[in-house]
Image (cartoon, rainbow, N blue to C red):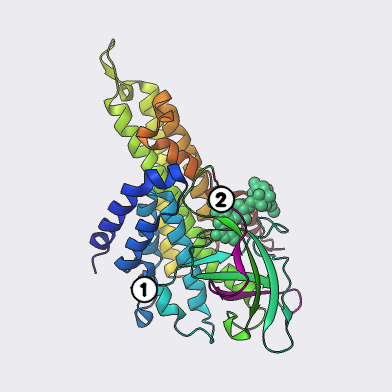
């Protein structure tokens, strides 16, 4: 399969609808359904379940390309892949067709981790699951932000285990289950098409829908979710940054000061700022590619890449999109350059958990020999 020719029509669809998705704050249904028919929803899933069997580098490439044209679509895609890879890591025996449904795009997946009580500390749900007399558990989980809320078919939901006190369990909760509801709306500064609304999961969940044995949730979060999420979130950040930088180069190379006969890019301060910004983006992109290769073939450096890649890319995107706004002057405030959308969308990455500041703390602990989650 030629990935870029598969991706091209999806990018065209996402680009066409991105301005309206942002302006109206609506879910990018056209792009998500184009992703579904393209096969890319199963990009890193194994061929045995209908996926394409690709790896982290291809996933990072596709996610960054999507972000260049529509940040919301890229984030929805990222959450789907994270949900799907987590299910794949420990398929729940009660839902045997789930992997192939996700691989072929029939079921859109997402993660329902963040809670009002533990905020961005996604590894520490407050919701306690309890046994319901038999093998089922019951829980009422208020989740503060769930991307694709009301659009996803599968919510990978975290709770405190009913069986192993103080540990975390993940359940595959299907949208159609009684007690699954969207409890608010999402009006974000950026990523406005994400539908990242609060949800409540007031459900009875059979043990056979749990991912892995009781108490396995924390390991799934750190060993499966974090590598895919941090890598993909970094790719979204750098895709948004690249989009803003390209637009800034285009604008400053063509906008002229007629009285001096110069373009904006001929001003030394502007071209120097573009150069510095461009180098920051290239350096972060090279690190992203190294991180993707390391996650594909893990060794002792991989945990550091997992911690570092998101923080570096999130902050690079803040700098690059800010500089792109700056060199384009007042024109960047207008929507026609597309830079202000990338600027707003890029603000989300560093506050998405694990937040960039938490990752710096973790990375600092890791390189000084302290326990990361201690
Ligand atoms: C667009 C969007 C989509 C989202 N989608 C999802 C989703 O699909 N699923 C999901 O589960 N969640 C999702 N989230 C939630 C996200 O992952 C975070 O949980 C949320 O953004 C945290 O916001 P908060 O106000 O609770 O942050 P807080 O936890 O209150 O953080 C406030 C500040 O404190 C800092 N901070 C907190 N703890 C530490 C620490 N230990 N060390 C250093 N600094 C610290 C943070 O970095 C931040 O700067 C989404 C968020 C956004 C913005």
Looking at the image, residue 325 lies above or below residue 95: above
Q: Is the residue indicated by label 2 positioned so its CB lies within 8 Å of ligand 1?
A: yes
The quarter of the rendered structure image containing the N terminus is bottom left
Out of 211 and 152, give the one closest to the viewer: 152
Which of the 4 quarters of the picture holds residue 281? top left
Mark 1, residue position: 104
In what quadrant of the picture does the C terminus appear? bottom right
What x and y, as percent, mark residue 184?
A: 61, 54
Which corner quadrant of the image does residue 289 belong to?
bottom left
* Magenta segment: 163-188
Q: Is residue 42 above or below residue 96?
A: above
Mark 2 and mark 1: Cα distance apart in space: 28 Å
* Residue at the outermost top position: 259
Look at 39% across and 39% down and name the residue there: 244
- Residue that mark 2 sits on: 186
| Residue at 36 percent of width and 69 percent of height | 43
Image coordinates of residue 310 in percent, x first then y, are: 52, 54
- The single residue placed furthest to the right in the displayed view is 165
Q: What secondary structure is found at the residue carrying circle 1? A: loop
For the stretch drawn in magenta, the main secondary structure is: loop
Which numbered disc, 2 or 1, marks the residue that appears first in the sequence? 1
Left or right of 1? Residue 113 is right
Q: Is residue 254 visible?
A: yes
Q: Quadrant of residue 73?
A: bottom left
**Which residue is at a point 63% across and 78% down the rendered structure image?**
216
40 vs 13, nearest the viewer: 13
Q: Is residue 284 magenta?
A: no
Foreground: disc 2 or disc 1:
2
| Residue visible at 40% across and 79% down in the picture | 100
Secondary structure at numbered mark 2: loop
């Amino acid at each position: 399969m030629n990935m870029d020719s598969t991706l091209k029509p999806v990018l065209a669809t996402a680009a066409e609808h991105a301005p309206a998705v942002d302006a109206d704050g609506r879910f990018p249904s056209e792009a998500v359904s184009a992703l579904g028919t393209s096969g890319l929803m199963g990009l890193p899933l194994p061929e045995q379940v209908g996926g394409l069997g690709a790896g982290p580098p291809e996933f990072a490439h596709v996610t960054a390309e999507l972000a260049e044209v529509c940040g919301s679509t890229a984030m929805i895609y990222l959450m789907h892949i994270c949900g799907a890879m987590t299910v794949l890591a420990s398929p729940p025996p009660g839902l045997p067709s789930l992997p192939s449904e996700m691989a072929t795009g029939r079921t859109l997946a997402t993660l329902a981790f963040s809670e009002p009580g533990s905020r961005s500390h996604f590894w520490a749900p407050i919701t306690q699951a309890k046994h319901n007399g038999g093998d089922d558990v019951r829980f009422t989980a208020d989740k503060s932000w769930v991307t694709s809320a009301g659009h996803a078919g599968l919510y990978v939901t975290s709770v405190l285990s009913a069986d192993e006190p103080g540990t975390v369990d993940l359940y595959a909760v299907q949208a159609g289950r009684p007690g699954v509801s969207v409890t608010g709306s999402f009006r974000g500064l950026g990523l406005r098409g994400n539908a990242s609304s609060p949800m409540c999961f007031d459900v009875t969940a059979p043990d056979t829908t749990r991912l892995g044995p009781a108490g396995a949730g924390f390991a799934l979060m750190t060993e499966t979710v974090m590598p895919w999420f941090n890598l993909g979130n970094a790719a979204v950040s750098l895709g948004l940054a690249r989009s803003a930088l390209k637009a800034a180069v285009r604008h400053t190379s063509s906008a002229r000061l007629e009285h001096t006969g110069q373009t904006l890019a001929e001003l030394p301060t502007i071209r120097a700022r573009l150069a510095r910004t461009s180098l920051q983006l290239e350096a972060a992109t090279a690190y992203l590619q190294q991180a993707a290769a390391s996650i594909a073939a893990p060794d002792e450096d991989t945990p550091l890449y997992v911690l570092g890649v998101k923080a570096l890319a999130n902050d690079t995107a803040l700098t690059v999109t800010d500089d792109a706004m700056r060199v384009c002057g007042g024109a960047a405030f207008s929507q026609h350059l597309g830079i202000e959308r990338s600027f707003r969308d890029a603000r989300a990455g560093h506050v998405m958990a694990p937040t960039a500041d938490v990752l710096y703390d973790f990375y600092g602990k890791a390189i000084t020999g302290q326990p990361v989650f201690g």
